[in-house]
Amino acid sequence: MLAALALCSLGAQSAYAAPNEDGGKPFCISFTSPAGVFRYEDGRIEPTDVLVADEIFTRKINAPLKEKRALMARAVRAGATYERAVTYCMPLAKKVIDSAAQKLYVAPVDAQIRFNPGSRPPFTIKRDKAGREVDRERAFELIYIAVQTGRSGDTLKLPLAEIKPDIDAKELIERTYMRSDFATEYSQSVEDRSHNIALALSKINGTVLGAGEEFSFNKTVGPRTEKNGFKQAKIIKGGEYVLGYGGGVCQASTTLYNAALRADMKIIAASPHSLTPGYVPPSLDAMVNGSATDLKFVNPLDTEIYIEAYAHNGIARVRIYGLKNEYAIIPVSRVIKTTPPPDDEIIRDSENKYFPIDADPADSMRIRSGKDGVKSEAYLEYYKEGKLCRRVLIREDTYYPLRGAIVIPSDGI
């Protein structure tokens, strides 16, 4: 029944207007707007069948204006919205307001952020723009008031409402706070190792991690192979330093790990080397390889984080941006026990790689320094306004001692 009436309402108005209380012209009202004038004139609706006729009679659609006025007033007093009260008696008003709403609608534009790692500043923000829509309830309220006061023929300004964007520029600016900044030095590294550190960081640079999203070092950096751009340099394997593709990449992962700790990321996977690293304290390293060992963490924030990672002039640096930290977080390493290395290994230079054939038998050359074994642990200390709030144990690790090595000439003792 209501569907039939709606179809009827969308048709042309009858030549017979709904009478007002004076028997004169039908009620009308005009709205001016930036899209032009929208005019509503109360019109008679001809029933198409008995059900529609009954609906028209019940809703007083073709009744005199004074009867509509009384019915609308009762509806509003009963809690109906102005739109519901007006369109109950004057269904054609909805068509006019719908038309205005369609022509005047302007969608809001959210602010947008662009991450430009390496640039200063590293972010550019395109400002938000409010949208516009017809304030429907206020428009129908004006029609209701005009009906109740008998002000047919009025021309009014169509009420418009601002539509606020979901994301404004201020909110985005708050997401660009530097949560952490951590650097390690590699200035004494050989060229190929330096290349690998810089390459790994370049593959991380510009990463945007969404709320709750997981970061994987191995997935982001890719395999440490010649095809992927990596070169051979010393790696730690089985408690020894040996040549391998990607040597130095663990310094990149360790630098990122320490930045992630300070940024309060949720660490999922981080493993120690078999030997203590030279660029961070024990229990603050993050060894990675191309198979089972990875550095993983999750962004625990409700908004994204941005990772800037680069190598320059012997410094590997990672910065993480996002919402401002609630705490200043400081990782702390504590050595529990040290184990001295075994006696030096004496290697005879039978191939004369280090000494000439006629070298003094008493000569010697150290080619590897010994390293202590270490048992250590790491904590995160949380500070607020300079005051330590809590201290959390995050790791306990054991590092092997490394035997030193001395080369003597082939004829040496």
Image (cartoon, rainbow, N blue to C red):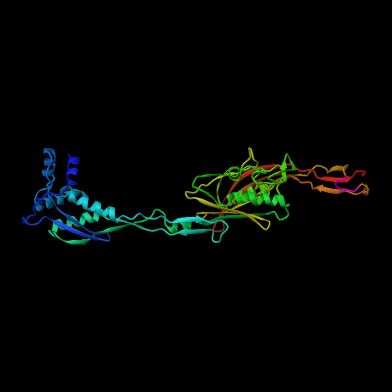
Instruction: Please tell me how many numbered marks the rendered image carries.
Output: 0
Q: Please tell me which residue lies in front, 307 or 47.
A: 47
Lateral position of residue 132 relative to residue 96, left or right: right
Q: Give the image location of residue 166, x and y in percent.
A: 39, 53
Q: Give the image location of residue 295, x and y in percent.
A: 61, 44
Q: Please tell me which residue is depicted at 15% across the width and 52% down the height of the picture.
A: 73
- Residue 307 visible somewhere in the drawing: yes
Q: Give the image location of residue 118, x and y in percent.
A: 58, 57
Q: Is residue 123 magenta?
A: no
* Image quarter of the C terminus: top right
The picture quadrant where one finds residue 145 is bottom left
Lateral position of residue 82 relative to residue 256, left or right: left
Q: Give the image location of residue 319, x and y in percent.
A: 58, 54
Q: What residue span does the magenta drawing correspond to?
A: 352-356
Lateral position of residue 210 relative to residue 200, left or right: left
- Residue 258 visible somewhere in the drawing: no
Q: Please tell me which residue is depicted at 62% across the width and 54% down the height of the picture.
A: 310
* Image quarter of the N terminus: top left
Give the residue furthest to the left.
23
Lateral position of residue 271 relative to residue 404, left or right: left
Magenta part, dominant SS: loop
Q: Is residue 72 above or below residue 1?
A: below
